[in-house]
Structures are given as structure tokens and as C-alpha cells.
Image: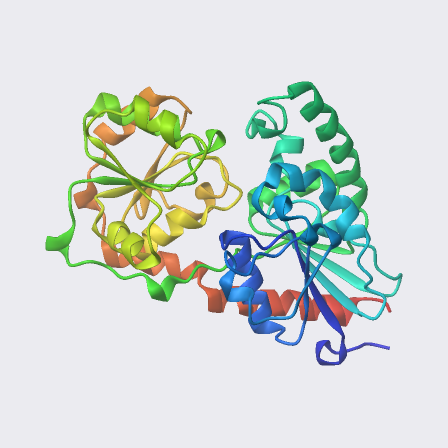
């Protein structure tokens, strides 16, 4: 007997709620679709994740330990335990929104568990891209913990009935590491909140928005613009901020953390947006395109799916300062049409996400053998 989604008791699962970044915005869109579904998560800080304060959020035992909310490096190794302790026995449909441990929940045989996978954790599976699990203090212990978590992550992937990937790039990695197929639904971007600035308001600076941590390739951008001598504005905070400021020349300005409104202004008035990371999807270049600005991106990961060469931006092919330098020198912002750039960005809107996501969920429910 087939069931309809309306008759199912639904739960949403998310890694942690200690800030509002890309994956949290995905969760908010899911909550708009499934308004009555409670959210299960390891830890929750309502001051730092304010949009979720009005919802029913159920936390693990880890939430009672203050350190877990502020130091993610301590939290991560305990998340497998946390998610295995939740009781989902009364739910017919569990949707986990995950980059790590939330997919490891244990459900009944007749419960459908669908995972929206933002990424298989790269610090476990691709340390050459994200070395956080191996570098730093206590590297031997880090590697041992990473090995154990990698084994658990592989087992956890088998608890998922259906995978939805946030990009073709992630779908390929799900296939490689978990040996599972998936359907791609690009994540939601709040396109409508970004505007094109009048042409006369566009300035001569380049813009870089990122968490200032090693694997985001911040140092590559700083080195390139040190050589170029062109104005670069950097928005973001992170562990590497002091080091990056020390290496930067006077043409590089660090703006720190900005409000959404201030950041949108910098987006719309930038000559171009720099995106050097190999990301799973990459929301910030889409936000730049929603502001009508062209993107200079590394030609790998999600950016290769969202940026259109010669229409919404251009690419550099090697993770070297010199390759970025050469690309910027050959870049001409005048050949790009802001209206066409923004028009392309609407392919990644929240409305589009909700429609496609609901369509995939309903198809699964229709075809699932209860």
C-alpha cells in the first residue's frame, strides 16, 4: 500500500546548529516545506543560530557540555555516538541534511531515511583537499581518530535508503566512497535578496568572501594580489586571519565579519568575485552572480557547474598564484552583462530547490515498497 507524504510522521536531522551557513540555509528551506517536522541535532546554540530558535529542536546529550558548542574540533569525534542515541521509532520518514554524522541515525526497517548530502566529509576521504583531520597539534591522534571515523562513516552510509546530492561533483564522490547512486538537487540560494548595482556604482576592487582557513585557499589569493597590486577586499573571519593579514600588502583590505546588507553592497559593487576553493557546491559565487558580478573561479568542484565560461565568469586551472595572476590580467569585466549573469543565477533559487526537492521526495514515497 502506497502512502502520501501528508500522512507521514517526518523528522529532520542536521549535524549541529551553532551558526547559519550554507547547510543551515538548506535546512531552513526544508523546514519551510515540512513545517511540523522537529529538528534533531547534536548541539544547538540559539544565539548563534537565531532563525532556528522558534522551531522544535531536539538535542543530544552533547548539548549539555558548553565546550561542544564553541569548539567543533572537540565535537566532531563524538557526533557518531550522539546521532545513534536518538529514537526515531515513531517516524515514517527521516530526512538528514548532512556533511558528516547525521546520516548515521538508526531507523526502523519500515522507515524511509533520505539523506541530502552536502558532501562526504572531505577531511576523512580527501585529506589532500582538506587536511584538517591530519594537520595541527596531536597529528598522530588526529590521524587515528580520522581512521576510526572514516570506517564509521562508511557504515553510516549504508543506513541511508536514498541519497540526494547537492551537485554532480558530490554525486560522483558519493558513488566513489559510498558505492551509492544519488539524485542531484542544487541547494537554495536567496537570489531575490541580491540586487544589481547601477553601472556607475561598480568600483575597481576585486572581492573575496570566505572563512579564513587553510583549505579555502585564502593564501593563494593573497599571494596573487600581492603580485598584481590590484585592490582586493576580503570579507570573513577564521583561524588564519592574523597570518593572512601579516602576509598581505597595502592593496589588500580585510573587512572582517559584515552584516548581510553590508556584504550584499560589496558584492554588487565589486569588479569581480574571486573563488579559489574546490568546493562541493559553493553558494558565495552564486550570490555574486545574483548581484550581477562576474566570477573568477577555480575550475573544479561545484563552481564548474554554476559558473558559465564567458557568460557569468571565467576559470583558472591550477591552484597556483601565478595561474590566478595570469587569469586576472587577462580578465575584462566589460565583456559581461550583469542582467544575463543574474538571470543565470535564478537557476539556483530557493523556490526552484523546494519544487525539485519535493518532487524527488514524493517520487521516492510513491515508488518505495513499504
Q: Which one is in front, 126 or 259?
A: 259
Q: Quadrant of residue 3?
A: bottom right
The answer to whether residue 237 is left or right of residue 262 is: right
Q: Quadrant of residue 364?
A: bottom right
Can residue 220 be spotted in the picture? no
The residue positioned 71% from the left and 50% from the top of the image is 62
Residue placed farthest to the left in the image? 200
Residue placed farthest to the bottom in the image? 7
Residue placed farthest to the right in the image? 109
Q: Is residue 92 above or below residue 113?
A: below
The answer to whether residue 135 is left or right of residue 330 is: right
Position of the C terminus by quadrant: bottom right
The location of residue 272, given as percent across then percent down, is 26, 43
Q: Which one is in front, 140 or 29?
A: 140
The answer to whether residue 288 is left or right of residue 127 is: left
Color theme of the render: rainbow
Amino acid at each position: 500500500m502506497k502512502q502520501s507524504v501528508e500522512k507521514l510522521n517526518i523528522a529532520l536531522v542536521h549535524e549541529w546548529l551553532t551558526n547559519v551557513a550554507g547547510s543551515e540555509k538548506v535546512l531552513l528551506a526544508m523546514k519551510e516545506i515540512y513545517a511540523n517536522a522537529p529538528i534533531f541535532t547534536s548541539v544547538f546554540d540559539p544565539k548563534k543560530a537565531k532563525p532556528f530558535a522558534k522551531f522544535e529542536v531536539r538535542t543530544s546529550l552533547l548539548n549539555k557540555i558548553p565546550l561542544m558548542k564553541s569548539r567543533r574540533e572537540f565535537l566532531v569525534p563524538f557526533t557518531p555516538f550522539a546521532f545513534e542515541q536518538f529514537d526515531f521509532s515513531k517516524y515514517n520518514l527521516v530526512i538528514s541534511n548532512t556533511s558528516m554524522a547525521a546520516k548515521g541515525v538508526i531507523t526502523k526497517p519500515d522507515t524511509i531515511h533520505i539523506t541530502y548530502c552536502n558532501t562526504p566529509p572531505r577531511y576523512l576521504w580527501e585529506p589532500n583537499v582538506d587536511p584538517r583531520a591530519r594537520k595541527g597539534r596531536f597529528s598522530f591522534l588526529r590521524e587515528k581518530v580520522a581512521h576510526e571515523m572514516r570506517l564509521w562513516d562508511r557504515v553510516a552510509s549504508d543506513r541511508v535508503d536514498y541519497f540526494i546530492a547537492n551537485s554532480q561533483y558530490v554525486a560522483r564522490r558519493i558513488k566513489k566512497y559510498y558505492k551509492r547512486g544519488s539524485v542531484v538537487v542544487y541547494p537554495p540560494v536567496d537570489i531575490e535578496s541580491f540586487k544589481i548595482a547601477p553601472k556607475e556604482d561598480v568600483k575597481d576592487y576585486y572581492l573575496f568572501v570566505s572563512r579564513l582557513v587553510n583549505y579555502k585557499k585564502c593564501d593563494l589569493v593573497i599571494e596573487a594580489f600581492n603580485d598584481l597590486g590590484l585592490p582586493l577586499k576580503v570579507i570573513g573571519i577564521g583561524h588564519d586571519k592574523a597570518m593572512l593579514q601579516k602576509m598581505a600588502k597595502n592593496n589588500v583590505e580585510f573587512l572582517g565579519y559584515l552584516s548581510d546588507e553590508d556584504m550584499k553592497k560589496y558584492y554588487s559593487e565589486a569588479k569581480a568575485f574571486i573563488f579559489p576553493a574546490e568546493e562541493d557546491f559553493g553558494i558565495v559565487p552564486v550570490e555574486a552572480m545574483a548581484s550581477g558580478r562576474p566570477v573568477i573561479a577555480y575550475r573544479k568542484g561545484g563552481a564548474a557547474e554554476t559558473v558559465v565560461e564567458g557568460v557569468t565568469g571565467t576559470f583558472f586551472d591550477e591552484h597556483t598564484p601565478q595561474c590566478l595572476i595570469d587569469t586576472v590580467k587577462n580578465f575584462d569585466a566589460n565583456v559581461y552583462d550583469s542582467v544575463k549573469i543574474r538571470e543565470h543565477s535564478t537557476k539556483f533559487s530557493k523556490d526552484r530547490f523546494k519544487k525539485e526537492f519535493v518532487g524527488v521526495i514524493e517520487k521516492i514515497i510513491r515508488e518505495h515498497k513499504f
